[in-house]
Structures are given as structure tokens and as C-alpha cells.
């Protein structure tokens, strides 16, 4: 029986996609439910999954643009497939491939899988590395398969370690799982080689949007700084109990998302958009959280953030970020935000001017936390400080609202318990003012 696998639809408005890469070779044996290919649109990356076990025949090549619903591949389910202990599809025992016939060497997928499993078993992986692998949904076999290019530099490095009897892979700060293959952009001393790589639809769309923002908006950026002491104390005090109850760690992004949602209520024009000659001002806060993925920047959206608690926001951010990084996110989860938050601090950024995510009119930029001397009640103290930035479209957002919004975020982060009271100070409620 021949099973046809068609290109899935990333969303209602998308009619064409690009075949990003095939995870299996033409003619390979695959198992039911195995991810066999990635398709890319200008909004998201999706995976094609084998609908049955059998031998795959690829009908659309990598980099080819195809219509949604087009035939991507077929699977011959009559091919006898057995499953190895590790879950890999392979040929029946005793069957040799044409390539190995008469050579005394087996090149079957069984032998390859066994060799890969044996190699993986020899590697020592730190607990930190295993956690990173878990976050990205990677197995040891995935890492080994990713090491596709071995050049002179890598060979000489191994030779040097062997000659000096130094361990190449240690159980310290560098482990087998944390060593990544050289990227195409990596510099090779003395080389004159250049590499060309086709831009993905997502990257092309992103570049178009960024240029349009610079050309079509009157973008300005205002800055402030936040004392992170109070939030860090709350995290330290309640982290264990929070983790035990909710099953995840409490981060900073949920505090900023909650603070931004409350600040948007006080300054609704920051949440507004231009539609022709009208200003559209939503009465809800759908806040996009910028997430860096291997395919580029994605912005999944937390809906109605103004009505959600910090634990709810934290759990939703974690779920959406995981979906984005593992290419499981839908177009609907990436669409319709009214405001965006981006955190360059995770990469070490001290200060930046984030660029607006159209058709939105503003974006909040977080940065890294640095201990600095600051004046506190007439005395100099060392405090963990963060610069925050608000880029906004000056066509509809005036300086009063942009500065006021950022000041409000600062007040809420420096007094985080106010967030439980809808942004009000306990004294205000007590005094009825």
C-alpha cells in the first residue's frame, strides 16, 4: 500500500510553504509518528510526520516552494519494517544492503543505529547539559547526527589532545553534549572559503517587516532603570515553594508581563494601533514574548495578560517558548498581539533600542542585571539594576504616555506586591485615595 503524505497548512492565510529540510533520506525506512521533514512559512515552521511505517519516497526537494496540500512524499507500507530497541526503523535481520553485498561489512540502518547507540553510551554528560538537552528536546543521537562537518581544525584538535593525553571531553564546564558543531559562519584561520545559504521564508519575512518599521513609523525610544532587589528577594523567598506547587521555576519575564499589562491599562494608547485613518485601541492586553529560535525570532502571544496571575503567565510563557523552539507552535499562537516584550539581557545586552513589532505601536526591552552603586535615601548602595527601554510610534503615542508607561513599569517592578492589588499601593487602598 502506498500512503501519500501531503504538506500541512500552517494557517488559514498561508497558501505556500518551503520544504526546509528532510530528516530522512530518500528510500529510508521510517516508523509511524516519526518526524521526517520540516516545512517553513513566513510565520512558522512545522514538521511532517510519517503516517505509517514503511519506505519513504521524497516528492519535493529541500528549498522547493510548494502549495499547501501538495504531495510531499509517499510511504510504501508494504516494506517490512522492524523496530530496533532504540526506536529506529531498520531492515529485517539477515538482509544485507546492495552496498555491503560481498564486502563483509553491513551498512544497514540497524548497524548504523547500533554504532550510534554505542558511541552515545561512551559519552559522559553533565547534569547541566542534560537539562539543556531536555529544554531543546534533543537526544544524544541528535547531537551526534548534528556533527556533520569534520575539518582540519577538528582533526588537529583531537590529535593534540591525544598526543598530550589531555581529555578532549571532560565532566567539567565542557561536555560532549555542550560541544556543538561549527556553524557555517565560524571563522577558520587561513581559509578563503565562503558559504552561501538561502534565507528561510521566516527570515525573509522578518527582514521585510523590520525595514518597513523603520520606513513607515516615527519610532523613538525612551529609557529608564529599575532596581531589581524586591523581585529578586521574592524569587529567593518563594522559589522552592513555587517550583513545588507549579512544577517550574519563577522567572523575571512573568513579573514584567504582569507589570506591562497593568501599565497598559493606565496608558491605553501604548496598546493602540493605526488602521488607516483610525486609531484602534484594544481593551485587552495580548502581550507577545519575543523568543529566539534556531529559525529566527518568533513572538508567541499571551492572551488577556491583564486578567492572568503571575503563575498563569509564567506557565503560559514556558509552554509557548517550548513550542516555538521545538517547531510545534501554531500560526494562531503567533498572531494578534497588541504589545511585545523582548529580553536582550539573556544574551548579555546592557542597553538597546528594540524595534517595534508591526502593526503594534510599542515594544518593551529588558536588559541584563548589573550591580551598580546607586543613591538610596541619601546613601550609596550596591543594587542589582536593569535598564529598560520603550520604543514607540510617535505618530499616536505622545511623550507623556511613553514616559509614564515606563515609569509605571518601574514602580511595579520595584514594588511587586502592588501587582496583587491591581497596581495600587496598599496605603492607597487603606486611605481610599
Image (cartoon, rainbow, N blue to C red):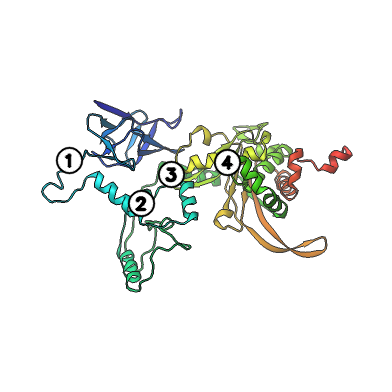
Return the x and y of residue 163 as percentages of the image width and height. Answer: 32, 73
Pick the residue in front: 408 or 359.
408
Alpha carbon distance from label 3 to label 4: 26 Å
For the residues bearing labels 2 and 3, Cβ distance under 8 angstroms = no
Q: In the image, is residue 129 above or below residue 363?
A: below
Q: Residues within 10 Å of mark 2 (few under 14, many from 20)?
A: few
Classify mark 4: helix, strand or loop.
helix
Residue 423 appears in the figure: yes
Label 2, label 3: how far apart the Cα atoms are:
25 Å
Mark 3 surroundings within 10 Å by alpha-carbon count, few (fewer than 14), some (14 through 19), many (20 or more): few
N-terminal of the pair, mark 2 or mark 4, is 2
Q: Return the disc, 4 or 1, that comes first in the chain's sequence.
A: 1
Task: Point out the frontmost of discs 1 and 2.
Answer: 1
Q: Which mark is residue 204?
A: 3
Name the residue rendered at 33%, 70% in the picture.
162
Separation of marks 1 and 3 at Cα, in angstroms: 46 Å
Q: CA distance from mark 4 to mark 1?
A: 49 Å
Q: Is residue 418 left or right of residue 316?
A: right
- For label 1, the residue is 95
Name the residue furthest top: 1
The answer to the question of whether label 4 and label 1 lie on touching residues, with beta carbons closer than 8 A, is no
| Residue at x 31% of width, y 59% of height | 150
Q: Which residue is mark 2?
A: 146
Snapshot quadrant of residue 326 = top left
Amino acid at each position: 500500500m502506498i500512503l501519500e503524505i501531503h504538506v500541512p497548512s500552517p494557517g488559514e492565510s498561508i497558501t505556500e510553504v518551503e520544504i526546509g529540510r528532510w530528516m530522512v533520506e530518500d528510500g529510508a525506512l521510517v516508523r509511524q509518528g516519526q518526524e521526517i521533514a520540516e516545512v517553513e512559512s513566513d510565520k512558522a515552521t512545522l514538521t511532517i510526520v510519517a503516517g505509517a511505517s514503511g519506505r519513504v519516497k521524497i516528492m519535493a526537494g529541500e528549498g522547493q516552494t510548494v502549495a499547501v496540500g501538495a504531495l510531499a512524499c509517499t510511504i510504501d507500507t508494504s516494506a517490512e519494517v522492524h523496530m530496533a530497541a532504540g526506536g529506529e526503523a531498520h531492515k529485517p535481520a539477515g538482509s544485507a544492503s546492495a552496498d555491503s553485498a560481498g564486502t563483509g561489512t553491513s551498512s544497514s540502518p540497524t548497524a548504523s543505529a547500533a554504532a550510534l547507540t554505542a558511541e552515545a553510551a561512551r559519552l559522559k554528560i553533565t547534569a547541566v547539559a542534560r537539562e539543556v538537552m531536555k529544554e531543546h528536546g534533543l537526544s544524544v543521537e541528535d547531537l551526534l547526527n548534528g556533527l556533520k562537518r569534520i575539518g582540519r581544525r577538528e582533526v588537529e584538535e583531537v590529535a593534540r589532545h591525544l598526543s598530550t593525553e589531555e581529555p578532549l571531553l571532560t565532566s567539567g564546564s565542557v561536555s560532549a553534549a555542550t560541544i556543538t558543531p561549527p556553524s557555517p559562519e565560524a571563522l577558520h584561520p587561513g581559509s578563503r572559503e565562503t558559504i552561501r545559504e538561502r534565507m528561510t521564508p521566516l527570515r525573509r519575512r522578518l527582514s521585510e517587516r523590520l525595514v518597513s518599521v523603520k520606513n513607515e513609523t516615527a519610532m523613538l525610544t525612551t529609557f529608564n532603570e529599575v532596581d531589581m532587589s524586591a523581585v529578586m528577594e521574592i524569587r529567593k523567598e518563594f522559589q522552592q515553594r513555587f517550583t513545588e506547587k507549579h512544577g517550574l521555576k519563577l522567572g523575571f519575564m512573568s513579573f514584567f508581563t504582569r507589570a506591562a499589562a497593568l501599565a497598559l491599562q493606565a496608558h491605553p494608547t501604548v496598546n493602540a494601533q493605526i488602521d488607516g485613518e483610525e486609531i484602534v485601541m484594544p481593551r485587552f492586553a495580548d502581550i507577545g514574548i519575543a523568543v529566539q529560535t534556531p529559525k529566527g525570532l518568533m513572538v508567541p502571544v499571551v492572551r488577556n495578560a491583564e486578567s492572568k496571575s503571575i503563575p498563569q503567565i509564567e506557565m503560559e510563557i514556558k509552554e509557548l517558548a517550548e513550542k516555538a523552539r521545538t517547531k510545534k507552535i501554531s500560526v494562531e499562537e503567533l498572531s494578534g498581539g497588541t504589545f511585545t516584550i523582548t529580553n536582550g539581557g539573556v544574551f548579555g545586552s546592557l542597553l538597546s533600542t528594540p524595534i517595534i513589532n508591526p502593526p503594534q505601536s510599542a515594544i518593551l526591552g529588558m536588559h541584563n542585571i548589573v550591580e551598580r552603586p546607586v543613591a538610596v535615601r541619601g546613601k550609596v548602595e550596591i543594587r542589582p539594576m536593569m535598564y529598560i527601554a520603550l520604543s514607540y510610534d510617535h505618530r499616536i503615542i505622545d511623550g507623556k504616555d511613553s514616559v509614564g508607561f515606563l515609569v509605571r513599569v518601574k514602580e511595579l517592578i520595584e514594588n511587586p506586591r502592588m501587582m496583587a492589588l491591581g497596581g495600587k499601593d496598599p496605603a492607597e487602598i487603606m486611605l481610599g485615595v
